[in-house]
Amino acid sequence: MLDEIRELQHLLLSKTRTKYKRYFFDRLHFDRLTGIIGARGVGKTTFLLQYIRQHPLPMSQKLYLSADSVTLASLFDVAKTFQKEGGKLLIIDEIHKFAGFEKELKKIYDFLELDVIFSGSSALKIDNSKADLSRRAVVYEVEGLSFREFLELKTGQTLPAYTLEEILGDHIDIAYTLQDRVDTGLFREYLMHGYYPFYFDKRMHYKLKLNETINTVIEVDIPSIFNIEYQNIRILKKLIGYLCASSPFVPNITTLLQKMNLGSDYRSLYRYLEYLHKAKIITLIRPAAKGDTVFVKPEKIYLNNTNLYYSYCQGSQIGTVREIFFQSMVKVDHTLTLHSKGDFTVDGRYVFEIGGKKKSYRQIKDLPDSFVVADDMEIGSGNKIPLWLFGFLY
């Protein structure tokens, strides 16, 4: 079995030639059991192959396997055999494809002396009713390309990232610094095509590949993780289409129940929305005071990123696109809620109103720590900040 796994590993390593390292490459700190979750297509497999290639251990002591690429009766048996042959580092990709992976990881952690890195869908659940992994595994969540990363891949440059506080306090100087190096005209290309790294491999067929990727998430990943019957997958697809018709969507639960033919089963509706949220297809903005509870009505629903909006939604409501971009960049390291006067509150402190170049500050002028985020401008002034700069947060 190890011979087959190593052969597949060799083939994958020979095909993975990208030298570009995503924002999270140096952010992750590995323990004995480390998980990496994220949306399908954001580069988890590429990262794992890059990591195993650069790790200082000899190749004989490192092993990569995808849980869906070979027929495995037991991950533990593979790990035990690998350790007997001198193995030290085991990387398991697509772990959500292996039924009962929680118990397998627990056995590996408890009985073997291996470092294990596993990856899976962003919807991955660590089910503590099956195995207490919460105190064993360190789990990181990774996102799609930022505008900064897109520019680096597009131009070959190395560009700096900035903290939110740096952008809020020094956005004029930062914008002037970047202006000589950044073609902000590429921002529109990013909004339509730049969130998923596979754009750079499949530019001519990007929209087709994106639709195939999301269909796989809905038809394969979500059912393999959540208890959802196959015939109800159509409801997930129908939800996406309906949300597009009024995006950003302010949900009316009664209307949604009727449109989805769910009668009065609001609990199922909330679960379906949560599945799409966990899978990084939509983003639910919930009330701050009520926490991140599945059965709390979301205040607003967005497509997860602007590429999904342009791919799934007819037309282009530019106001919606701006809000989707802002929340997709800021939520990586910060918390967002809605604000009664502005569009968003970030980290419970900063208030942001999103709009075009002519957007007035009048609506939030009396609020402390408030900012207008304006599209179609390269350099801001005062508390008016160019939208594209928030693409440099990571």
Image (cartoon, grey):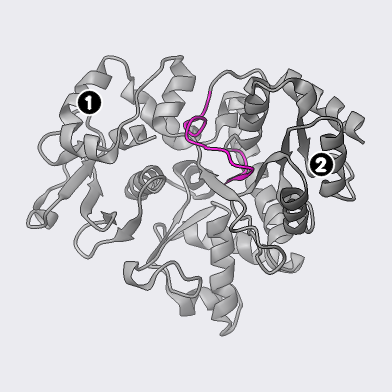
Query: Which amino acid, by three-letter code, is at mark 1?
Result: Ala
Instruction: Determine the secondary structure under disc 1.
Output: helix
Q: Badge 2 local density, few (<14 within 10 Å), some, or many (20+)?
A: many
In magenta stretch: residue 39: yes
Look at mark 1 in the image and give the residue it sits on.
175
Image quarter of residue 99: bottom right
| Identity of the residue drawn at 56% across and 85% down | 264
Please give left or right for residue 361 compared with residue 22 in the image: left
Give the mark nearest the N terminus, 2 or 1.
2
Q: Is residue 205 visible?
A: no
Residue farthest to the left, as pictured:
366
Instruction: Determine the secondary structure under disc 2.
Output: helix
| Identity of the residue drawn at 80% across and 44% down | 68
In magenta, the rendered stretch is 21-41
Q: Position of residue 229 (x, y in %)?
A: 74, 68
In magenta stretch: residue 35: yes
Residue farthest to the bottom, as pictured:
264
Q: Magenta segment, principal secondary structure?
A: loop
Look at mark 2 in the image and give the residue it sits on.
79
268 or 164, which lies in front?
Answer: 164
Please give left or right for residue 251 compared with residue 57 in the image: left
Q: Are marks 2 and 1 in contact (CB under 8 Å)?
A: no
Q: Position of residue 375 (x, y in %)?
A: 26, 38
Which of the image's four quarters has the C terminus? top left
